[in-house]
Amino acid sequence: MKIAISYPPIINKRGQKAMVSQNRNVQFFKTPTYLLPVIEAQAATWLRNLGYDVYWDDGNSQLKSLEQWFEELVEWQPDVVVFESTTPVMKFYWKTTNDLRKKLPETIFIMAGYHSMKRPQETLEKSAADVVLKSNHVDFALFSLIPFIEKNPDWRNTCTIEGFTIRVNKTKIRDTGAFRQVQPLEKSPLVDRDLVGWKNYAYENGNYLQTPGTYATSVIRDCMFGKCTFCRYNGPEFTFSKMSVKKSLDEYETLINKYGVREIFDDSGVWYRGSDARAFAEGIIDRGLHKRGCYFGFNTRFEYLDEETIKLLAKANFRFVLIGLESASDETLRRLNKGYQNQYIEPSLRWLTKYGLHPHLTIMVGYYWETQEMLDKTVKFVENLMFKGLARTLQVTLCTPLDFTPYHLECLSKKVLLTKNYNDHDMSKIIVKTPIPHERYYEAVKKMYSIAYHPKFILRQILFLFKFHKRDWQFLFTYGWRAIRRVRQHIYNLTQANSEA
Amino acid sequence: MNTMQRARVVEIRRLSDSTFILKLERNKFKFIPGQCVNIGLVGSAVNREYSTYSGEDDNYLEFLIRKVKGGTVSEGLSKLKPDEFVTLDGAYGKFTLVNPAGKQKYVFIGSGTGIAPFHSYVKSYPKIDYQIIHGIRFESEQYDRQDYGKGRYIACVSKGKGGDFAGRVTDYLKKIPLPLDKLYYLCGNRAMINDVYDILSVKGINGSNIFTEVFF
């Protein structure tokens, strides 16, 4: 069987490309950041290992136009096409599936992604898709489904594997039940870097201080916490699964030795903590990987890592630490179920910077309850952290309800959602009723991005140079210029969307 | 939504060398049985999630905690004295019973301290029809066995003597009939949940009837 795992290039009317961004949502940018979809890459690897002919078809990273991508996919004549979509590009995927169906009448179209898994019937009604995966464990789902389809011509009627909604015929849809929430992650293979064209993702990523960089096969599936209301990893469909420290270390060793990677980021929703984090850092040191000029990075949460663990991570040459700072308001943190308190943000960051790591803050504004006072508090708090050198970089986005997360459902039930058009969920504008005009939130975003130009911030970066860490020099002279370009783009995006609204 | 961010320690009740119950002042803290709460040491900037152990109507909060070797939070909590404080955030999560007042029958399967949410269910909803299957290493880990109804608690002891079944939870489940119409709640370590899930699937239990909460 010929299986294509496909990502069409999506370009909006302003010529910006759809990219995966904060909270794994889609955002449109002119300057690309190509992120390897790790779970799908594991799925591709697994299917190829089973003997299937797999076509890794990421039109974005392969720099194809939509037309070129479409023609080449049709020409390849796949038996199965697997898509992954989210709310803001759902309509695009439905149309694309319908267009492809006309050219590929016998092909089976499978839709994965956080939106359709919550509303499978909708996708089967609005598009020519044949199957909707009710799980984000695309690798495990395809591993069981594809062989079944191959061996059973009447699979639409006979498939009892749980976790799918299947189109039986023009009028009938079948649901096979809930997908398994906890998977033995050891079974899913490490990503085959050659199969997915790893170099296409190795350079255009603003978070890399050194290139080539790459994303590790994620050690955590879903989230260890999994309670934040705005996040996709929240709901009865999700728990969490964990890969062994050894397996991950083996991959890092291969990435450094075989591929010459100089920065590795693990994009697990939340990376290891406690004894696992310490065992990983010790493993890096024991294998001598900390002296190979490769930086390591991960996502974490406030109040997750203690000082001893952070110290060990620093010794193992960890650098980039991405942390969500959703608000400085404790009320907002509570409403979002964040599980940390404002008073512990600064101590956590102080530990990270004390040992030379580079914290990157991901901030959100525009919650439907966020007052001017809450907003001002967040802006002031972030400025203070950046001026003190307690965080090195930041990104700010508009909190956008999507993919039927608890926050999305809350917005629907409270009738504060201002649009029914899925395209509007692309984080380019606020789409909920708020206690203050939307312009105030846009101003706050600009203000926080403008910290990068502030003399106090620049002076702080210069002072870091006197610690004589290579990474601080790289930060100022390599990353600094790149960051300024990106800041301008973020501000442009907001201004454009705002003026067109 | 709870606004309380600190709670006073009432008592540390030691159950074994490594396991204890942290009893806190309630102060109108709201939770739904089965939810978890983030607990930390005041001033430490590190917290961890623990499932509620006490009942919804109890006038105190209880958490069943296993001391993890090298674990900053659990070791620190075990050393607390009455009248000291902890930080508290929550309660969160959906590992709760959908309709505890209904006639639904439940099978609760837990390993070690994974029995905590089930204890909270039983204390909160005394009329529910349930069976608890508890996987433990030693007989001494049958925490608060007397709180469960007669015949409703089965201890599967994998090391040493005692309990109701000599062997692992998985061995026990393979030997007994598992009705398809019950709801199965699994809580504890990943390996146990993976293995139990496989057994339930083989015995025909649909994934829609299985709910999981992974501790580590």
Image: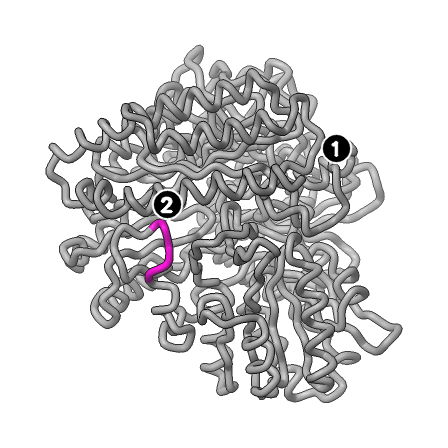
Lower position in the chain sequence, tag 2 or tag 1: 1
Residue type at mark 1: give it: Val
Q: Label 2 marks which chain's residue?
A: A
Percent coordinates x, y for residue A231 in the rendering? 57, 43
Mark 2 on the same chain as mark 1: yes
Dot 2 amino acid type: Arg
| Residue beneath the point at 41% across and 77% down | A195
Q: In this orientation, which residue lies closer to the viewer: A353 or B141?
A: A353
- Residue at which label 1 appears: A416
The color scheme shown is one colour
Q: In which quarter of the image is residue B2?
A: top right
Residue A32 in percent (x, y) is at 44, 57
Give the residue at mark 2: A485
As measured in the structure, the alpha-carbon distance from the residue carrying label 2 to the one carrying label 1 is 34 Å
Q: Does the magenta stretch include residue A150?
A: no
Identify the image quadrant of the C terminus of chain A: top right
What residue span does the magenta drawing correspond to?
A: A203-207
- Residue at x 80% of width, y 47% of height: B104
Q: Which of the chains bears the disc numbered 1?
A: A
